[in-house]
Amino acid sequence: TLSDRLSGVFDKLRGRGSLSEADVSEAMREVRVALLEADVALPVAREFIGKVKERAIGQDVLRSVTPGQQVIKIVHDALVDMLGGAEADHALDLNVAPPAAILMVGLQGSGKTTSTAKIALRLQKKEKKKVLMASLDTRRPAAQEQLKVLGEQAEVKTLPIIAGQQPVDIAKRAMEAARLGGYDVVMLDTAGRLSIDEQLMAEVADVHRIANPAETLLVVDSLTGQDAVQTAEKFKARVPVSGVVMTRIDGDGRGGAALSMRAVTGAPIKLIGIGEKLDALDEFDPRRMAGRILGMGDIVSLVEKASEEVDQEKAEKMAKKLSKGQFDLDDLADQLKQMRRMGGMGAIMGMMPGMGKMKKQLDAAGGFEGKEISRQEAIISSMTKKERKNPKVLNASRKKRIAAGSGTSVQEVNRLLKAYQGMSTMMKKMGKKGGMKGLAGMMG
Ligand code: GDP
Ligand code: MG
């Protein structure tokens, strides 16, 4: 996947003292391949790489993060830009005299009907809008019935079905019913098309004219990759698409469609479908999406946190100790304190590229999450200085004493020691791989 590829590229950059232009160029070649494999359109990938290179070369390296991490942040920021920008407003704009119509268009099976119900439910529940849904899908026999059933599930009103009525007339009736009934929003769900088909396009254009929608949302299946982007271009040529709903973001898509969508079509992604259930709808957040694409959690906040919280001098001292294999339980206690400040080991691990495996190992060994940490600190502080410096002396009777002193159990003491062992081994390995500075820079 894109995120695997990228994290491979970034692993190579981690732990370097400084980045040369050649380092950046090499990494960017791989990022480019990763983007193309993720189905990002070629011109978009090219422009993206250009932007990242320009920003990466010649930027001052932050004191407390590695240059590699900084490149990741630059890539992240460029992704955010490509997805529409951190500041951009992706909310639905329903600021018209009610009833505001939302016209849903898209290919068959893209998720129009499901998304119609999801959006209606959200507007009704969260924004306290009075919502009416109407199905204009007269092509598929059970389509109107499908929306009615979803309406019953979501407890959102649907326009009564009148057999034989044409889409344009249903649209008129829906708008009229909404006006009379004092509705705020009318959701118009249209017939799908298997591919762009002139007759259906004309129908959508007619409905658009009649309903004069506040939003015309194109629903695309993110799993269809570049096809989704081409579909968007074609729809945009016929109706003024005001926003895109990308569905099946929960699926195993390659992510490229979301990246190209804004760049190629100019249409902002407004909402994403993340499952089949009616509440599986999210506002589109370029920052979160970029994080998802990078598959490495929020590296940006890591870089930010690291530069805020970590004392560089102390980190370097720790790095030296670690690389010599001098990692004792006092150091672990130090690390635990640091972790607690930064939101738990899990949070940190989640932010570090390629650290998923390491986190699993630690979880298996007892876990280093939030409230666990204070118990672990209690265990360590119940040890004597000698025990902390040399945990090997910890025999059964000492462990029993420590458990009693810290209000824990011998099992917990054992779990902590096992985690310490795992960590110590891992640190040595990281030291050999040259990743030490990065790790210590983040943790201590
Ligand atoms: P339409 O033909 O465009 O109206 O598509 P539908 O709304 O009928 O959806 C087709 C199928 O896709 C249904 O089985 C939905 O449950 C499913 N679906 C829609 N959106 C999502 C989504 O975001 N995630 C997943 N996993 N399934 C979705
Ligand atoms: Mg449908």
Image (spheres, rainbow, N blue to C red):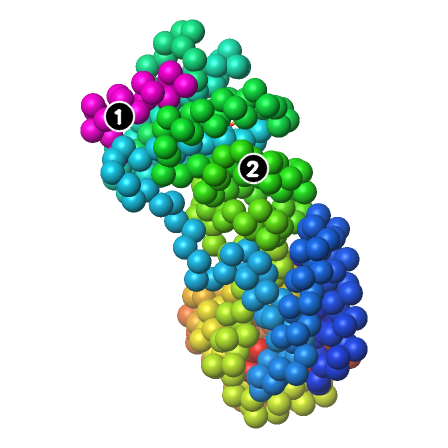
Q: Which residue is rendered at x = 42% and y = 7% of the image?
A: 164
Residue 195 drawn at (x, y percent): 64, 26
The 10 Å Cα crowd at callout 2, few under 14, some 14 to 19, many 20 or more, is few
Residue 423 drawn at (x, y percent): 65, 72
- Work out whether residue 363 or residue 100 is closer to the camera in this orientation and state it: 100
The 10 Å Cα crowd at callout 1, few under 14, some 14 to 19, many 20 or more, is many
State which tag comes first along the sequence, 1 or 2.
Answer: 1
Q: What residue range appears in magenta?
A: 168-184
Residue 277 visible, this orientation? no
The answer as to whether callout 1 falls within 8 Å of ligand 2 is no
Which mark is on residue 178?
Answer: 1
Closer to viewer: mark 1 or mark 2? 2
Q: Amino acid at mark 2?
A: Ala
Which mark is on residue 237?
Answer: 2
Q: Which residue is rendered at x = 61% and y = 92% of the image?
A: 317
- Work out whether residue 444 or residue 332 is closer to the camera in this orientation and state it: 444
